[in-house]
Image: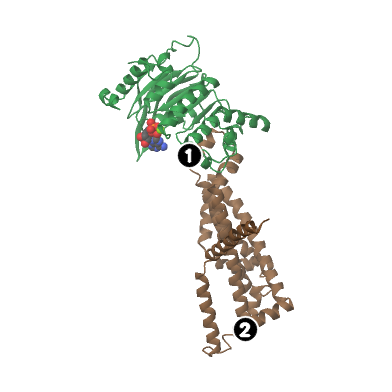
Chain colours: A brown, B green
Amino acid sequence: MSIDAAAATTLPAEARAGTALRSVTRRIDWRPWTAFAALLALWFAAHHFGWVPAKYLPSPLAVVQRLIREVTAGTLLDDLHETLRRNLSGLVIGVAAGLALGALLGASSLVGRIVGPTVLAQRQTALFAWVPLLAMWFGGGDTGKITFIAVAAFQPVVIGTWRGISLVPATYRELSHVLLLSRWNYMRLVALPHALPMIFTGLHGALIYAWLATVGSELFLNISPGLGGRLNEGSQLFEIDLLFLVILLFGLIGLGFNTLAERAEGLLIRWNNR
Amino acid sequence: MNAPFHSPSPQAPATAVPALDIRHVSKAFVVDGKAVEVLADISLSVEAGSFVSIVGASGCGKSTLLRLILGLDLDYAGEIHLDGRPVEGPGPERSIVFQEHRLLPWLTVEGNVGAALLHSGLDAAARRRSVAEHLELVGLEAFAKAYPAQLSGGMAQRVAIARALANRPRFLLLDEPLGALDALTRLRLQGELKRIVAYEGATAVLVTHDVDEAVFLGHRIVVLHPRPGRIAAVLEVPEEARADRSSPAFVALRDRVLELLGVSLGEGRAR
Ligand SMILES: Nc1ncnc2c1ncn2[C@@H]1O[C@H](COP(=O)(O)OP(=O)(O)O)[C@@H](O)[C@H]1O
Ligand SMILES: [Mg+2]
């Protein structure tokens, strides 16, 4: 390869790298992070200048040290594992039940008329009102917690699936009659694909509600391994660094779930509009 | 003009049962608690293999009549018989092309056409063959894997025609199938539709408000008057009119239909 040719190929490559970098920096939205950074700075300052007694506000450094200690001892990872296991178990059960009942409600107007109002009424009850009842029925251990998480995940999914399926336009229903589609083929080819965006909105809600319920169940039901248990421990032993650490973790995981759902929703919308 | 609706038309043998027999059909919708008559005493018989065009202003009950023939709505007075049997609901021997293509956006072209065959009893291989054959018939075999959003309006409507024909229906109902297309595409598809329907040997009922289309495609033209929709005239289309859009017979018949529809001829000619 001649030098000229090499120069000719490297130059555009550099230019390409430049645009790639620029497009990456442009793609990251920095604005949310400025608020985050400001809060962090405020925290540092509050600790450094002693605006708040250290008893109520740990230094950011202390939280990081606590994190390192918990991770090396393996305790935090165990708790994280327990919490996520509980969260996902409840989520899977609630979502499966929500999809099944939602499909049934949407597919059969009789079922919709009989069971529908009850489902809507259940939706109106504040989520945490279920905690004492479920604790009595299933105990405060794992079963009670997972049931509560499942109830939380169930609500948005059943509504989304039901609405999505029952709102199939009359034109498509008429077409299905003319094509003599069986009930199964109607569900498979018409109703479910039509309902998909609404089902997805329901799943997104389920992810968020299930996470709230996970945190809540671990706080309000009896202490067992899990991040919520550590939060209780922190408040009872007045370990302010532990409290801060766990709250930060809760926030990060919730944010992660939300980002995941938004990404998946974006993909789905692109698929739907292809 | 008063057509002899009940006596068999000249082309059919005198003893034949008409393929489609509509007898004294009236239909009313209840709107705000009041019954509004939409179709009044419609009687029409269509012999097997013939093509009937129904023209009328929009809102005069054309789509409603097709829905009754399809068996989508059984709440009407009068009787509709197919090959001597009353219509009791949708059936595999009837199909329809709607004004909008009404393709399912999440299915490919072949998936949409194939949906019409799920009830046919054919095995998967035979269904695939029929889908391929009918896509070829409408000239879209290269687009089998495309999605409706990737097609032009004319192409999507051709897919809808393929879907309507895939199950080899003996009755093809066409509800302003080309109404949403641009003028050039419409002219081209009118020719295709004529060829395809003749090839399949289906009995066709076309509803349209395009008089040229009605004359070009139909063996007979039924002119409807509105509010309530009722038959004003039934006109035979001479072969030479069907064969050539610029023939004197075509122009004369078109003018006659326009006149029956209440379009003054001066206005009609000026267009
Ligand atoms: N489901 C319905 N309920 C009430 N009125 C209807 C219904 N369907 C159609 N109509 C009325 O019946 C008349 C004829 O409608 P349609 O058959 O769609 O006419 P066309 O196809 O000739 O334009 C219109 O006035 C329309 O508003
Ligand atoms: Mg119409």
Dot 1: within a 10 Å radius of its alpha carbon, few (fewer than 14), some, or many (20 or more) residues? few
Q: Is residue A63 left or right of residue B11?
A: right
Instruction: Return the residue nearer the eye: B253 or A26.
Output: A26
Q: x and y percent of residue A248 in the render?
A: 59, 75
Disc 1 residue type (three-letter): Thr
Residue that label 1 marks: A171
Disc 2 residue type (three-letter): Leu
Q: x and y percent of residue A198 in the render?
A: 53, 52
Residue that label 2 marks: A61
How far apart are labels 2 and 1 at the CA level?
63 Å
Q: Going by the picture, which residue comes out furthest to the top? A: B14
Q: Chain of mark 1?
A: A
Q: Chain of mark 2?
A: A
Residue at screen point 61% across, 51% down: A100
First of labels 2, 1 by sequence position: 2
In the rendered view of the protein, which quadrant contains the C terminus of chain B?
A: top left
Q: Is residue A48 visible?
A: yes
Vertical order, B176 against B247 (above or below): below
Instruction: Return the residue nearer the eye: A4 or A173.
Output: A4
Residue at screen point 67% across, 69% down: A83
Q: x and y percent of residue B162 in the render?
A: 54, 30
The part of the image, by quadrant, that contains residue A107 is top right
Instruction: Return the residue nearer the eye: B142 or A201.
Output: B142
